Amino acid sequence: MNRVDRPEMLLRMRADHLKRRYGLSLADYDKMYQQQIGGCAICTKRSLNSTGKRLAVDHNHRTNQVRGLLCSRCNAYLAWYEEFAAQINDYLLLTEGGGDC
């Protein structure tokens, strides 16, 4: 493969991944990106950070419904929160409610 073909191949691979994993076209991703003014839906941090990462597609893991685009940090924190939300809420209720801890 020559250097001219590589960018085209990478774009095609990205398009295939978005379609297969989330049911999105590149145009769908670009529209979401524009609607979010190029920033994370939670913290508004701009995409393509120093490591060159794009905004991640956030989706509900049970329904696969796409919710928005997130930076890698918010995406990881949200996944962690979703896993431990009940425990976090119980802890906050206990500690804010004057528990014995």
Image (spheres, helix red, strand yellow):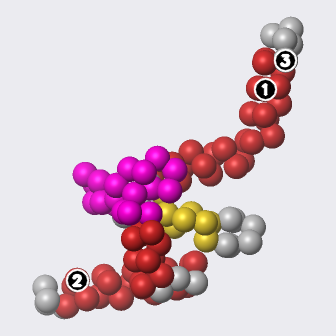
* Residue 97 is covered by the magenta coloring: no
Q: CA distance from mark 1 to mark 3?
A: 10 Å
Of badges 2 and 1, the one in the foreground is 1
* Residue 40 is covered by the magenta coloring: yes
Label 2 secondary element: helix
Image coordinates of residue 84 in percent, x first then y, are 73, 42
Label 1 secondary element: helix
The C terminus: image quadrant: top right
Q: Which mark is residue 97?
A: 3
Q: CA distance from mark 3 to mark 2?
A: 56 Å
Residue at position x 36%, y 88% in the image: 12
The magenta region covers: 36-53
Dot 1 amino acid type: Tyr
Can the viewer see residue 37 in this picture?
A: yes
Image coordinates of residue 64 in percent, x first then y, are 68, 73
Label 1 packing within 10 angstroms: few (<14), some (14-19), many (20+): few
Between residue 38 and residue 77, name the one nearer to us: 38
Dot 3 amino acid type: Gly
Residue at position x 70%, y 49% in the image: 82
Q: Mark 2 — residue?
A: 7
Residue at position x 52%, y 82% in the image: 24
Residue at position x 38%, y 63% in the image: 37
Image coordinates of residue 5 in percent, x first then y, are 19, 91
Dot 2 and dot 1 residues touching (CB under 8 Å): no
Q: Is residue 89 above or below residue 27?
A: above
Q: Earlier in the sequence, mark 1 or mark 3?
A: 1
Q: Mark 1 — residue?
A: 91
Image coordinates of residue 100 in percent, x first then y, are 86, 8
Q: In the figure, residue 81 lies in which quadrant?
A: top right
